[in-house]
Image: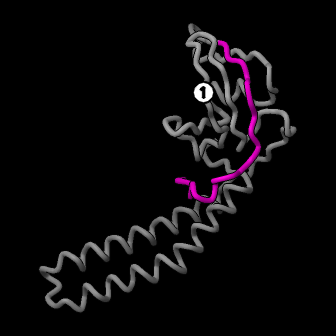
């Protein structure tokens, strides 16, 4: 359930791993060498900070590699005019009279504060497969639901490379 990734997610993770191994690792090793050359290591805060940063990078690489290794790859079989994974949808929430924009993502990438909504969340499940103009009931609990109208579906991935996703 929580290790679902799309092929695009895996490609982005592999790109991050490569960047961390080739660029970041080299920079951090240089920082450690510089800090070590400053003398007495027992009172050298810069040395310990540089080592900690280097270890965090290595930990992140292992984490991403493990995520890829254990991932269940999910496919988005939605048509271009339907809400699907990695598509941005603009909805009008009738109850509040506001328009909001969300990107439907896998559970690994969800971050509702950033507008990334899981395909397994109540909203994600309700919106998947619907088209522009559809009125959709989003059931939050057995006692509460609300209605939304799909205004726009965007399939573009413009700006995603800048996003360097946090998995």
According to the picture, the residue beneath numbered tag 1 turns out to be 100
Magenta span main SS: loop
On screen, residue 11 versus residue 41, left or right, reads right
Q: In percent of the image, x 64 and y 67: which residue is there?
A: 14
Name the quadrant of the N terminus: top right
Q: Residue 104: x, y in percent? A: 67, 38
Place of residue 82 in the rendered image (x, y in percent of width and height, measured from the top left):
82, 33
100 horizontally vs 126: left or right: left
Question: In this rendering, would 142 be left or right of 45?
Answer: right
Q: How many other residues sit within 10 Å of disc 1, few (<14), some (14-19) or many (≥20)?
A: some
Rendered location of residue 119, percent (x, y): 67, 35
Give the residue displayed 25% in from the left and 88% down from the top.
Answer: 36
The magenta segment = 147-167
Q: Quadrant of residue 141?
A: top right
Image color mode: one colour
Q: Residue at x 52, y 68 (%)?
A: 62
């Amino acid at each position: 359930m929580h290790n679902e990734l799309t092929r695009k997610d895996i490609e982005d993770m592999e790109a991050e791993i490569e960047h961390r191994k080739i660029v970041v690792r080299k920079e951090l090793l240089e920082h450690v060498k510089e800090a070590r050359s400053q003398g007495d290591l027992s009172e050298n805060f810069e040395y310990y900070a540089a080592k900690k940063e280097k270890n965090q990078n290595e930990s992140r690489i292992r984490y991403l590699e493990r995520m890829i290794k254990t991932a269940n790859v999910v496919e988005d079989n939605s048509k271009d005019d339907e809400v699907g994974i990695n598509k941005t949808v603009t909805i009008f929430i009738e109850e509040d009279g506001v328009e909001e924009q969300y990107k439907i993502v896998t559970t690994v990438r969800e971050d509702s504060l950033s507008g990334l909504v899981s395909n397994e969340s109540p909203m994600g499940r309700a919106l998947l497969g619907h088209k522009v103009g559809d009125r959709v009931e989003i059931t939050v609990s057995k006692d509460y639901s609300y209605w939304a109208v799909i205004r726009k579906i965007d399939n573009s991935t413009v700006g995603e490379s800048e996003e360097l996703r946090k998995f």
